[in-house]
Image: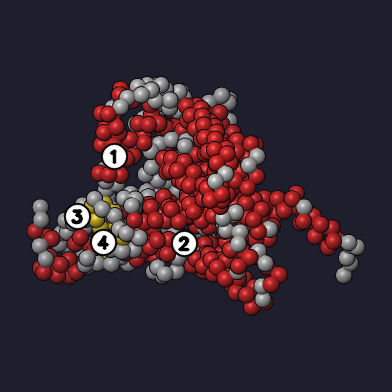
Amino acid sequence: MISVPGARERLNSYLKSRKGQNFVALLFILFFLFFNAMSVQGKDWTYDEPRHYRYGVNILNGDSTRFDDSKMPVSAWNALPARVADFLPAGLLKTYLKKLITARLMTTLFSMAVAFMVFHWSRELYGWVPALFSLGLYILDPNIIAHSQLVTTDIYVTGMVLLSSYWLWKFANSRRWQDGLWFAVMLGLAQLTKYTAFSLYGLFAIALLVYDWPSLKKGFETGRWQEIRHSIWQYAKYTIVVVAISIVIINAGFLFNRTFMSFGDYSFRSDLFKSVQSKISFVVPVPYPFLEGLDWIIQKEKTNTGFGYIYLLGETRFGQGFPGYYIIASLLKVPIAIQVILLAAVAVYLVDGERRGRFFRNEWFLLWLVLFYTIYFNFFYRAQIGIRFYLIVFPLLYVFAGVLFMKRYSITWRQKGALVVLGLYLISSVISYYPNYISYFNEIVWDRKMAYKYLADSNLDWGQDAFILKGYRAEHPGVHKAPETPVLLTETTRYYLDVNQLVGVTRDPGTYKWLRDNFEPVDMIAPSYLLFEITPKNMRDLCRRTTYCDQE
């Protein structure tokens, strides 16, 4: 065997350099791009995508007027390729830029940037090998994969929460104006992705105050009032700069649509804004559709308007959610291997005093948001219609998971073997669902056609399989959609039905109760379309012992 003298040393030297480490991370991220591009093939529009895309087109056309509460300017990024295509001559490039898959891959490109930030932050905290580990968790999370290939805003807000948190951490530790400026810009851009990001203002203020509390407390205890006044002035400057930059970015994103309109001239829907409006009036420095959308969101959340029925573990509710919904959803939809790894990271962190000693300097900026959003989404948020709302905590957790390898040289061979097994298990679990990642469930749900008994809505059925259903029906004309009222049969019949109608998310829960309570699917046409086989005898027995068949 011929060896090149010094090859190993050169390789080690290369991997110790930022350039070499970034190159390895880039290979991982390019795989993520390829995997997304392949798995999104043949998927129909999900229910929300057309409206997000339409708003993006409107923004590019210079119109930010609202027709929906939650559509945001960031969707212009997805509509950009088609707009570029308008200026190109007819040809292959023009055709491709106008395709749905191109619009979707714009989200993937952004998610690639988020993936690199997961790697970058983990590397700064724990080193480059832990950073690769964190990156692997992100790109192999099937929920991240699923929503990185859609024209929606869930990945955008997920990424901007991570980016804003990173720059706050940088600023808190350095207090350099450059870091503070980057933080302010990222926080402002986050407001163009989803209204969830509006909560970051208060959360980040608390995070910074807690970080600074030891020095502030010392100033109060020793009576050094000049230092305290200086600190107050510093916080005032931070606030002014952050608010000013946010206002500029929000105005630019919403195209300065009716900026400086009087608060009293707004047409509000929510009681909260109406109450404030009845007491005071002032000039609003942000565009009308920005505050209008926030008002609509508050009203929808309070009245449950637009969410329909909420479903969990076989129970359907209207007007109220389920405490712990997102915890349960995560237990079912996050790969078991990732759950084990995250628990191991927490355990290792808690038993190691050296790691814990850096908590408020480092991990506080990750875990504070995880703690808040876990409590909020599980016990106060009413729109429990999919794990996609909870994705914002995932990258933060994956950065933190790098702590598991912080002292990698002390990891035993047995522990390394266990991690290899977990990694192979994770890869096999994710690949086994290819290309259906919206409907991914871990092995707790072993029989995939029974997933509807646990979760529905955008966790399983978001309209993505309509193309598959169309092709199946063309090949099997004898398969019919299940009727709302059962009828006697003269021959064995196969019915199909989508999950959300079956469990009562998009229909009254009583509509398909006859099918849901008396029959189980024999197969899946696609993850979101179930196939039932009913014999004449089955139907006669049902009609004899129930009143379903008597309904008109």
Query: In 3D space, how far apart are the residues under numbered discs 1 and 3 (Cα atoms)?
Result: 28 Å
Regarding residue 382, the answer to whether it shows in the image is: yes
Query: In 3D space, how far apart are the residues under numbered discs 2 and 4 (Cα atoms)?
Result: 21 Å
Q: Are marks 3 and 4 in contact (CB under 8 Å)?
A: no
Identify the element where label 2 is drawn: loop
Q: Which residue is mark 2?
A: 334
Whichever of callouts 3 and 4 sits on the residue coming sooner in the sequence is: 4
**39 relative to 475 in the view: left or right:** right
Q: Position of residue 202 (x, y in %)?
A: 45, 43
Q: Residue at x 24, y 67 (%)?
A: 519
Q: Amino acid at mark 2?
A: Val
Task: Please state which of the two labelled residues, at mark 1 or mark 3, is closer to the viewer.
Answer: 1
Task: Please state which of the two labelled residues, at mark 2 or mark 1, is closer to the viewer.
Answer: 1
Q: Please name whichever residue, 383 or 123, is drawn nearer the observer in this view of the structure.
A: 123
Badge 4: how crowded within 10 Å, few (<14), some, or many (20+)?
some
Task: Please state which of the two labelled residues, at mark 3 or mark 4, is closer to the viewer.
Answer: 4
Q: Which residue is mark 1?
A: 299
Q: Position of residue 76 (x, y in %)?
A: 49, 33
**336 relative to 3 in the view: left or right:** left
Res 255 label: none
**445 relative to 211 in the view: left or right:** left
Q: Residue at x 56, y 55 (%)?
A: 360
Q: Amino acid at mark 1?
A: Gln
Q: Which residue is mark 4?
A: 315
Query: In 3D space, how far apart are the residues under numbered discs 3 and 4 (Cα atoms)?
Result: 14 Å
Task: Please state which of the two labelled residues, at mark 2 or mark 3, is closer to the viewer.
Answer: 2
Q: Which residue is mark 3?
A: 511
Query: In 3D space, how far apart are the residues under numbered discs 2 and 3 (Cα atoms)?
Result: 31 Å
